[in-house]
Amino acid sequence: MGRRDYENDPQAPQANSLVPAASVVVVDDTGRILLQRRVDNGMWALPGGAMNIGESLPECAVREAREETGIDVEVVGIVGTYSNPRHVFAYDDGEVRQEFSICFLARPVGGQPAVSDESTEVRWFDPSAVADLPMVSGVRKRVDDWRSGAMPALG
């Protein structure tokens, strides 16, 4: 399913859904960050997605990391909360989702990098190498918040 991100865009469609979601910054023992290149937009992104009924947000982060990258993770902290009502995701099926996501910090505990039906590439990056990678603004903000080490303002 295709997706288009709109952030602070007056031409963005009106949101018609709000879905709890989790993303995860996975950092290995050498300080590298795990990223995936998404099928739907070709951009580099953190693993993440919508929470399922019956799971917690940290469980969602663990599941999404495994499904999208092949890496098993353990959540060790929170990077930030992201709920900008002016950031929406428009899907091909007509859903326009308002952003509502908690970004977790995790460490790898097993698995091997592997692509999924949502990714074309999965790689570990040195933090200095991510600045030039193509990313949507919301993912870039999460990565920059992690890189800065500062807890972002709520919002």
Image (cartoon, rainbow, N blue to C red):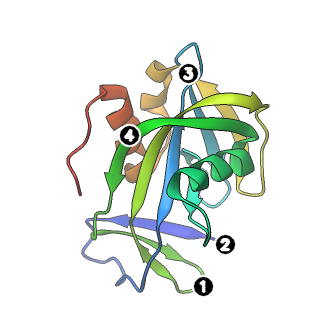
Q: Residues within 10 Å of mark 1 (few under 14, many from 20)?
A: few
Q: Residue lying at the far left in this picture: please name it.
A: 153
Nearest to N terminus: mark 2 or mark 3: 2
Q: Is residue 147 left or right of residue 62?
A: left
Residue drawn 71% across the image and 42% down it = 69
Instruction: Tell me the SS state at disc 1.
Output: loop
With respect to residue 114, does 1 lie above or below? below
> Which circle, 2 or 4, is nearer the viewer?
4
Q: Residue 115 in the image: state x and y as whole percent.
A: 77, 45
Residue drawn 39% across the image and 52% down it = 138
Hey, what amino acid is under mark 4? Val
Residue 79 marker? 4
C-beta proximity under 8 Å, tags 1 and 2: yes
With respect to residue 49, does 1 lie above or below? below
Instruction: Tell me the SS state at disc 4.
Output: strand
C-beta proximity under 8 Å, tags 3 and 4: no
Nearest to N terminus: mark 3 or mark 4: 3
**Figure quadrant of the C terminus:** bottom left
Q: Quadrant of residue 92?
A: bottom right
Q: Which residue is mark 3?
A: 32
Q: Residues within 10 Å of mark 2 (few under 14, many from 20)?
A: few
Residue drawn 56% across the image and 65% down it = 50
Q: Whole-Å distance between the Cαs marked 1 and 2?
A: 8 Å
Residue 93 marker? 1
Q: In the depicted view, which residue is nearer to us: 9 or 100?
A: 100
